[in-house]
Amino acid sequence: MNATEEMRQVLGRVKREEFAGRAAELQRIVSHAASSKLGDRDGGLLILLAPLAGVSELLRQAYDQIYNRQGDIVPVYFALPQTETTAVSAAIEFLNTFLLQYIACRRNEPSLAHASLTLNDLVKLAPVADVDWVEELVTNYNQQRFGDDDRALVRFCLSAPSRVPSHCARPFVMFDAVQLSGYDDESVPFATEIVRALVFSDLPFVFAGLRREVADTFDRAGLNARSLEVIQLNPLDEEDAGTLIRSAARRLAVSVNDETRDLLVQQLEGSPLFITALLQSARAKHVSLDSYLACERLYVEEVMGGQLSRYFAATLERVTADPETRRALVRLLSESATSKSSSGMKTASFETWFRRLELEAVEVEKILHRLHIQELVNWDGDTVNANGGPEAWKDYLRSRFRLDALREPRALVFADLMAAALKRAPERVARHYRQGAHLLLRELISRFNSQRVPSRLFNYSDFAGLYKGADPAEVAAQLDADTKLIKLPQVFHTTSGVSFNPELRQFADEDSCVVAHAFEGATYSDANEIVWLVAKIESKLEASAQLTEQWLDRLEAMARRRAFVRTQIWLIANEGFDSEAGSLLRKRGAYGSSQQQFQLLSARLSEGEDPASHSGDPAEFVLVLPMGSDSELLAANTVEQLARRAQFSPEAINQIKTAIVEACINASEHSLSPDRKIYQRFRVEDDKLVITIASRGIVPANIESRNGAISHTGSGETTDGLVGDVSDEFGNAAEQRRGWGLKLIQTLMDEVEFERVDEGTSLRMVKYLRK
């Protein structure tokens, strides 16, 4: 087959190169068709999609790729039609589509896939290798359709792919069941029959449906969906949505610029359906989308009477066919969308819906179930939360309520909706840009993993006194040489502060306040558990004491309300904090940083770990020795060679060797290591030698009682910046050989840090090179 034929569009609506996003998902579908084995009942691929995520074009693109290979796999794409009203008519449509596409592929005639042909026509067009089974299938169908068993007819039609003989090309069915909820009133359980036919066909298949509906469908069919491969399909991310807008605008000859593209990405929430609909409307109306005004005018037109309006109207018709019920439903949803409970959620009880809709309870349940599947409400059986759906849906509800229920003039409703949209536009884009920075905040905190960083990065007053106005490169270099360090906690969970206190929405964006649960010293105990409360606060100048105190009060109140036992507050302001605010932060035990400090910390953690922990560096060596058999002497000889090469003095070399020997003996005698190995890491830096001795096993009781962490510098200052008596960290060490060994190591090395790590202990020792 030549290159031109390979690029043919058969079912795809856009060219492959113009199909934005979904590259990984497309590859998985195409690969699944080829890799699944015949007779494998776990050979299905489920696509669980969020409403408006868009799956139809993805499946059509997959169809075209498989079709153009012209191999022994024949693609079949079928989407449940919105126009069909019964399971029987939809099943017959499936049979026709299956035979039409199968024969089109076998004859390598793409135009046949779009032809309107009868089953008798298809028998005449069937290739010689397929004509016998096609004719038999059509004959049996004609016998079935005159019977009075609708369920048997549906089963026969859906089983058509499994009736293809094994020596013929294998069908690969891609079933687009997004409209499945429209068939839930049938006497024939259509959803159940579809999934059972696919699974029991022993053929590979794709079944795509709304994520809240697919699992329920498989459960009702008595099938295990968890045994199948799954693709989670969400709306396009910002990059792919922007690419789609640029591509579609170019194809449709619609003018957009970077500013309006960003607005449309945010306003249409990454929905391929909404993006395509709006751009198609712009082309039909010859509108250039080169300003916020033009975008919002077209958007409101679409919501009140264009494709978006028709889409939402059709959705409501599938929820309930009765016009009066739909009007009551629009009123109830609109009112729910504008009323909030004390928790910030738009909720009501099932009883409220039952009374307001004035229907039988079973009918209300059906309505709520259909709305829940579309994610327009969240319903748990008792409570209905009407906060679901995209912003366009909420605008549609507002407009329909005012037009249909309040009978307001259309011009007034249009003007108000237009004004509201224009007010939201710059706020929406600005929020998007701010969220980019706030997402970085949460991402940064998620990287906290017991790294040691300069304490000045968390103390604006100290930082500004030394580095304000200095060259950034000089600041970074001086921080690299800074020995006053703090040890970050090991963060295991982060979430928005709004999750704990919805009232924070009044003061900041949802992502500008983060709650991080962590452990200090990587030791998982109650005493070491800590919660960091972090907030980025808005201030054009240095944050004032008043603003700082307000945020400290809010976060401390939230900590008390949520019963957080140990907390650490960290506030970040663009320009830092004035002197009074700095004093307040110190008094309240809180950290305060500027955006510059935040960025410097981000740069240091960008690799995800402390630089000293990376293996593979040319100045780093790893040695694993068995415990016992004088292995500590081998370690001492190794470190002696490294220290000599780094030009340490003979006295310093002897001190390092003694410390190594003591560390190895302690690990051998007291760790109860299951693998009886000592893991040693030596790193030679410009001004120091860093040695880490680790072993699996237990932590001695006198260390465990101190939360498993010892940090010491030669000056008597702990690496978290707190001065104290280092010997106290060991308790009554004279009673234990290991305690004396650690005390000796402290006198020999410049920095010593002991900590509990997963399944063992780690001792980090540093010796500085003095020239």
Image (cartoon, grey):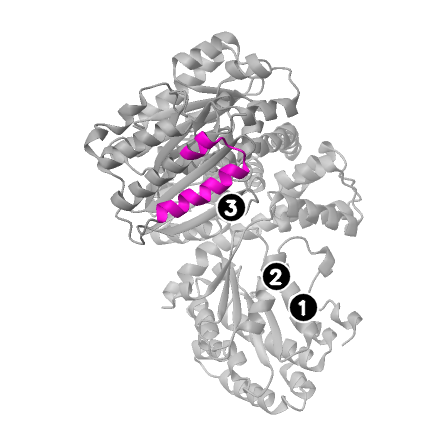
According to the picture, the residue beneath numbered tag 2 turns out to be 26
Judged from this view, the residue extending furthest toward the left is 735
Q: In terms of secondary structure, where does tag 1 sit?
A: helix
Query: How far apart, in angstroms, are the residues tagged by discs 1 and 3?
Result: 44 Å
Residue 389, position as x, y percentages in the image: 51, 43
* Relative image position of residue 334 (x, y in whole percent): 49, 37
Extent of the magenta region:
631-654
Query: Which percent across, then down, holds residue 533?
Result: 42, 27
Residue drawn 40% across and 47% down?
A: 634
Whether residue 261 is situated above or below residue 34 in the rendered picture = above
Q: Residues within 10 Å of mark 2 (few under 14, many from 20)?
A: some
> Is residue 703 in view?
no
Residue depicted at 54% across the width and 33% down the height: 647
Choose between 522 and 35: the one closer to the eye.
522
Q: Residues within 10 Å of mark 3 (few under 14, many from 20)?
A: some
Q: Which is nearer the N-term, disc 2 or disc 3?
A: 2
Residue 65 — which label?
1
Q: Nearer the viewer, mark 1 or mark 3?
A: 3
Q: Earlier in the sequence, mark 1 or mark 2?
A: 2
Residue that mark 3 sits on: 615
Question: Is residue 377 within the magenta segment?
Answer: no
Location of the C terminus by quadrant is top right
